[in-house]
Image (cartoon, rainbow, N blue to C red):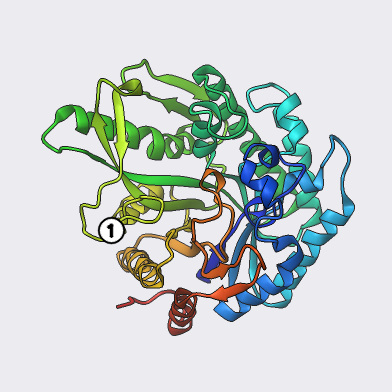
C-alpha cells in the first residue's frame, strides 16, 4: 500500500441509481414513486465531474448486482460496460476507484432462492464477484461487504430490511456464510489482481451508558461495544466470531478470515447511549442524546467526533492500515455540515499525528441519495439534489471540503 492519502467520497449504486431488479425495489413504496433514486445511472458523467470539482483523488462506489445479473445466470453485458466506462473515466481523471461488491442489495431472485442463511448463497455471490473482478483487473481497492452487521441486524433480527427475517439462529448462519464469502473473495481477488487491497467496511459506533452510575447501563454499553465494534475485529485476528447478546450464552462461529485483510474500512457516524429497561426487547433501550451540545442530525443521531478516535484505536489492533470508508451527516444546514467535516477530519489528523496508521478519509456522500428506510430527505450530500429535476447544486460544505483537500500536501496536516 503506497503512502498516498486517499481523500474521497463514498456512494452506493442502489442509493444513487435504483434498480427495478433489486430486492429493495419492491420493499419500499417510496421507490415506486422514484425508482431511479438520484438518477445517477444516467447522470454519472456529470457526477464524476463533481469529483474533479472537489479535487478528490479517490471514489468509493458499488456495482449493483441486480443490474449485472437481473435473472439468475443471465449477465447483462451492457450494464457491465456501463460500469467499465465509469471506471475508465475515473482513471482518466486520476481518481482511484474503490469498488464495493455488496452494499445491502441483491437481485430479487437471489433472496427468494439463495438467502444468506442457505448453503447455496456463497456460490452465487462468488460467481458475481468473480465476474466483476475479471471485468476490472486494473482496480486495486475492493470492499467485499459493506456493514455486514447492519445487514444482519436489519435483515435478520429487526426485519426492517430485506429479507425481513427475525430469527437469531438464521442470522448466525447468514453472517457465517458472508464471512466465508469474504475469505474466498479475498483469495480470488488476489489471484486475479496481485497487489490488490481488499477489506470490508465495518460500521462502528461509540457506545456509552445512559447513566454512568448505573452498573446495568455500563454492562449493556460494554456488551454492545464488544459485539457491534469488536467481535468482527477479533474474528479477523482469531478466525472465530464470538457473539454475545445481553443475558444469553455466547455463540461461536468459525470464520476462516484470519489475516484476510489488506486494510480495514471504518464507517463511523455517531454515539449511542444504552439503558437497562425491563419493558423493552431484550431489556435494552437505545437512544441518542445531545450531551456535547452540538445538536442532533436530521436523523436524530448525536454528533460525537471524539468517538471516531476510539474506533480507530480499536481498528489498528489488526496491524493493517485503516481507511475511514464513510463519515457524514444528514442535515439541510450547510454550516452544520461544514462543522461536522472539520471536526471529524481534525480527529483523523490528530490520530495520524499520534502515530495511528490511517491512509484515507471518504465523506458520505457525493450527492443526496435514497437513504434506505429513511427515504429521500436525509441530506448527506455535498451536492444537493432536486429530486424532481435531478439538478445538482453544490453546498458550501463542498467548497470547504475542496479547500481542505487543496490546502493539505503529502497527507493531512492539522486543520484548525
x and y, in percent, of residue 390 in the image = 66, 67
- Closer-to-camera residue (28/245): 28
- Closer-to-camera residue (77/413): 77
Q: Can residue 3 be seen in this view?
A: no
- Closer-to-camera residue (255/56): 56
Horizontally, residue 193 falls left or right of residue 305, namely right
Helix or strand or loop: what does disc 1 sit on? loop
17 lies above or below 239: below
Horizontally, residue 319 falls left or right of residue 21, namely left
x and y, in percent, of residue 115 in the image = 68, 27
334 lies above or below 207: below
Circle 1: is it few (<14), some (14-19), or many (20+) Cα within 10 Å?
Answer: some
Q: Residue at x 25, y 20 (%)?
A: 278
Q: Residue 330's image quarter? A: bottom left
On the rendered image, what quadrant is the C terminus found in? bottom left
On the rendered image, what quadrant is the N terminus found in? bottom right
- Closer-to-camera residue (252/388): 388
Q: Identify the residue at the far top of this view.
A: 249
Q: Name the residue under label 1.
A: 295
x and y, in percent, of residue 275 in the image = 24, 32
Q: Residue 218's image quarter? A: top left
Q: Which residue is drawn at 63% across and 58% down?
A: 61
Q: Which residue is drawn at 47% across and 56% down?
A: 321
Amino acid at each position: 500500500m503506497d503512502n498516498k492519502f486517499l481523500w474521497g467520497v463514498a456512494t452506493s449504486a442502489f442509493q444513487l441509481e435504483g434498480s427495478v431488479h433489486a430486492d429493495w425495489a419492491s420493499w419500499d413504496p417510496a421507490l415506486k414513486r422514484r425508482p431511479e433514486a438520484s438518477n445517477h445511472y444516467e447522470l454519472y458523467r456529470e457526477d464524476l465531474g463533481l469529483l474533479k470539482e472537489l479535487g478528490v483523488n479517490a471514489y468509493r462506489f458499488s456495482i449493483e448486482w441486480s443490474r449485472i445479473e437481473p435473472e439468475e445466470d443471465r449477465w447483462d453485458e451492457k450494464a457491465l460496460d456501463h460500469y467499465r466506462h465509469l471506471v475508465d473515466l475515473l482513471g482518466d481523471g486520476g481518481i482511484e476507484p474503490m469498488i464495493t461488491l455488496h452494499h445491502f442489495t441483491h437481485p430479487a431472485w437471489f433472496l427468494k432462492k439463495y438467502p444468506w442463511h442457505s448453503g447455496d448463497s456463497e456460490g452465487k455471490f462468488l460467481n458475481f464477484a468473480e465476474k466483476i473482478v475479471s471485468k476490472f483487473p486494473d482496480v486495486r481497492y475492493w470492499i467485499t461487504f459493506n456493514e455486514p452487521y447492519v445487514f444482519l441486524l436489519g435483515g435478520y433480527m429487526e426485519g426492517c430490511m430485506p429479507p425481513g427475517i427475525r430469527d437469531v439462529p438464521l442470522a448466525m448462519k447468514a453472517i457465517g456464510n458472508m464471512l466465508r464469502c469474504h475469505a474466498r473473495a479475498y483469495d480470488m481477488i488476489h489471484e486475479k489482481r496481485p497487489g490488490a487491497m481488499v477489506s470490508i467496511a465495518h460500521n462502528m459506533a461509540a457506545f456509552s451508558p445512559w447513566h454512568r452510575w448505573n452498573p446495568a447501563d455500563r454492562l449493556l454499553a460494554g456488551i454492545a461495544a464488544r459485539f457491534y465494534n469488536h467481535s468482527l475485529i477479533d474474528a479477523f485476528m482469531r478466525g472465530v466470531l464470538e457473539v454475545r447478546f445481553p443475558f444469553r450464552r455466547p455463540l461461536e462461529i468459525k470464520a476462516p478470515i484470519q489475516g484476510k485483510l489488506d486494510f480495514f474500512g471504518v464507517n463511523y457516524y455517531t454515539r449511542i447511549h444504552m439503558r437497562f429497561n425491563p419493558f423493552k426487547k431484550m431489556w435494552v433501550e437505545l437512544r441518542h442524546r445531545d450531551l456535547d451540545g452540538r445538536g442532533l442530525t436530521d436523523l436524530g443521531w448525536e454528533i460525537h467526533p471524539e468517538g471516531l478516535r476510539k474506533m480507530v484505536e480499536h481498528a489498528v489492533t489488526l496491524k493493517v492500515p485503516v481507511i475511514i470508508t464513510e463519515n457524514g451527516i444528514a442535515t439541510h444546514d450547510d454550516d452544520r455540515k461544514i462543522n461536522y467535516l472539520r471536526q471529524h477530519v481534525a480527529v483523523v489528523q490528530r490520530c495520524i499525528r499520534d502515530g495511528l496508521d490511517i491512509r484515507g478519509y471518504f465523506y458520505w456522500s457525493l450527492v443526496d441519495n435514497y437513504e434506505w428506510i429513511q427515504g429521500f430527505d436525509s441530506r448527506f450530500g455535498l451536492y444537493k439534489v432536486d429530486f424532481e429535476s435531478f439538478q445538482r447544486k453544490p453546498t458550501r460544505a463542498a467548497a470547504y471540503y475542496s479547500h481542505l483537500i487543496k490546502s493539505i500536501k503529502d497527507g493531512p496536516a492539522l486543520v484548525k
